[in-house]
Image (cartoon, rainbow, N blue to C red):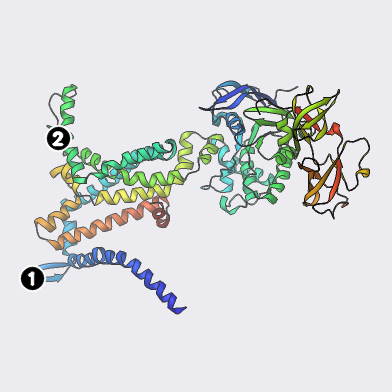
Amino acid sequence: MRDSRWHARLVLGLLLAPAVLWLGALVVLPHIDLGVLSFRERVGPRQYVPSLAQYKTFFAEPLYWHVFVRTAVMSVLATFLTLLLAFPVAWIIAKLAKGRAGSLLFIICLIPFWVSETVRTLGWMILLRESGVLPALMVKLGLTAMPVELLYRDATILVGLVYTSLLFMVVPLVSSLESLDNSLIEAAYDLGASGFTILRSIVIPHAAPGITAGCIVVFMLTLGNYLTPTLLGGKNSQWFTEQIYTQFITRFNWEQGAAFGFLLLGLSTALVILGLRLSGQRFGDVMRAT
Amino acid sequence: MSTPDLLADAVVKRFADHTAVDSLSFSVARGSFFSILGPSGCGKTTLLRMIAGFIAPDSGDIAIGGSSMRGVAPNRRPVNMVFQQLALFPMMSVGENVAFGLARRGVGRAERTKRSNAMLERVGLGNAAHKRVDELSGGQRQRVAIARSLVLEPTLLLLDEPLGALDLKLREHMKIELKQLQAAFGTTFVYITHDQSEALVLSDHVGVMSHGRFEQLGTPQDLYYRPQTPFVAGFVGANNRIVGRATASDAAIAEVTSADGWVVHALKSGTIAVGDAVEAFVRPEVATLARNAAELPAGQPRHAGVVQSVLFDGANSAVLLQEAQTQREFRIALPQTGQFSDLKPQEQVAFSFEPSRAVCFKARTDA
């Protein structure tokens, strides 16, 4: 009896080992090290003292926290736009398309993800740059006299971010909408509700965990995205991950970079908690919906 | 006579490969309980959904409370529906569920609460307004679903097999409750079911539906005692079916001889000529059973059989016989006197039935 229990524990332990190792070696340990790094200051060659200087710099230098706030606002905006775009898509896949048509639509959403993010983003650059496809088309249609540079604008960054995130919103939305019993919609309609009322009082409350889950995932991905804002926004993008990159790679200021990293972590955590509070969702329910 | 609450005029609905509802016309009088009874796939759900407005008929018209419903959306019809799975809103409390329709009509919050509470009171759930839907039992949910519809005072309440999901005991109980609710509210109920007992117990009138048409429309007693078609005779209540040819016929009674040579007599329904293929039906309770042929009522043709099995079911007990000559199965209801409580398989028995209480039809050429 004791033996078999011990045996079961061993098996469980072995099964969990890869996950624990992965979390420990790649997430927990580096974060402990970065945490230590962020709370010290270099006072001479190879001489460090504990200090809050890195965090003070962040608040003292307007550029840093401007970029920080901008990244947060743009990420929230991108998440919201992704939700607006993904909801009808998910509705069509979950409710309107029947059988194979639904799977086909799902695959169409998935196909862009067979290509690496870099290549996808470069594709956008080919379309949008001054000598690219879209500006040329606009000249041909007589919309503009000269080719216009469509890259390096905030709207371009948003387009890229929404495009990259769409699938991560569609998947939880489809699963939460699929579990919505059609007869609830019909019952509401039968009781006199309009389409908008049904959406507001039946569909959205039912899909809320899925909506929140999708928003959390998309928000995290967007906030931590480096490639898309850099390539599509260029120097103008002013994305906070670029600041972190600069500190680590260009300036060799690991202490400052680590502090920025933690600020970003704090920001995303705070906004996710705020989002959960505002939508009245519990984290457990939301995670089950993903 | 006042205008009927529901009037269907030559309603047709075709789907790609078959006609679900085939030129159906009927009317339902105000305040009555009307059931549509049929096996699954007979088109009864399609018909109900057309009345509710979820699908539009291909041709024909449906009028509710005297006005045509053509082009009127479900949320604008004076009709409410109780769904098969009830479709209570799990994201709302019981009270909010009942008040939902009132809110859609722009009834103010205080008035809404008052009316939904009064309705819950009437269905015996006066203290459940603040409960969550999943805290209720099956029967209570049933009542909430009905209350949610009735609070809107619809001209017509549609019920789509609402008892199907309940267990037997509760179903029997809810049958009685539904009938009492209908009597108390006086609302016209249109009820669809595949369960003939529900239809017989509940309804003032029943339409028996098959392949998109009404086989017969009448009171439960009509359907049971005076079926008009073989389908109705076979579908409503238990019946012994004997297929054969008419070998003799007088003004009322035909002699039916089965292919294997069993001769029975039954009342003719419609014109039957000698030589026609016919189907005869004998209800289990019409036949008299006796251990000794001499005890059978005089003047009835007598048959002999061997007990195959005794189906004890309290008041519904029956015995399954094999007719001596043809080995055909024949079911006879056991009398309540306990006279045959010691009946054993393989016993030789005699039976007879009054020919005028059995019925025969000309067999359908397409069947």
Chain to which the residue tagged by mark 2 belongs: A
- Tell me: B121 left or right of A158: right
Say which quarter of the image contains residue A287: bottom left
SS for tag 2?
loop
Other residues around mark 2 within 10 Å, as few (<14) / some (14–19) / many (≥20): some
Q: Residue at x 46, y 42 (%)?
A: A203
Question: Distance from label 1 to label 2 (Cα)?
Answer: 46 Å
Label 2 amino acid? Arg
Label 1 amino acid? Arg
- Tell me: A99 left or right of A132: right
Q: Which residue is mark 2?
A: A129
Q: Which residue is mark 1?
A: A46
Q: Residue at x 33, y 41 (%)?
A: A107
Chain to which the residue tagged by mark 1 belongs: A
Can residue B300 be spotted in the picture? yes
| Image vertical order of residue B288 relative to residue A27, above or below | above
- Percent across and percent down for residue B212 are 62, 28
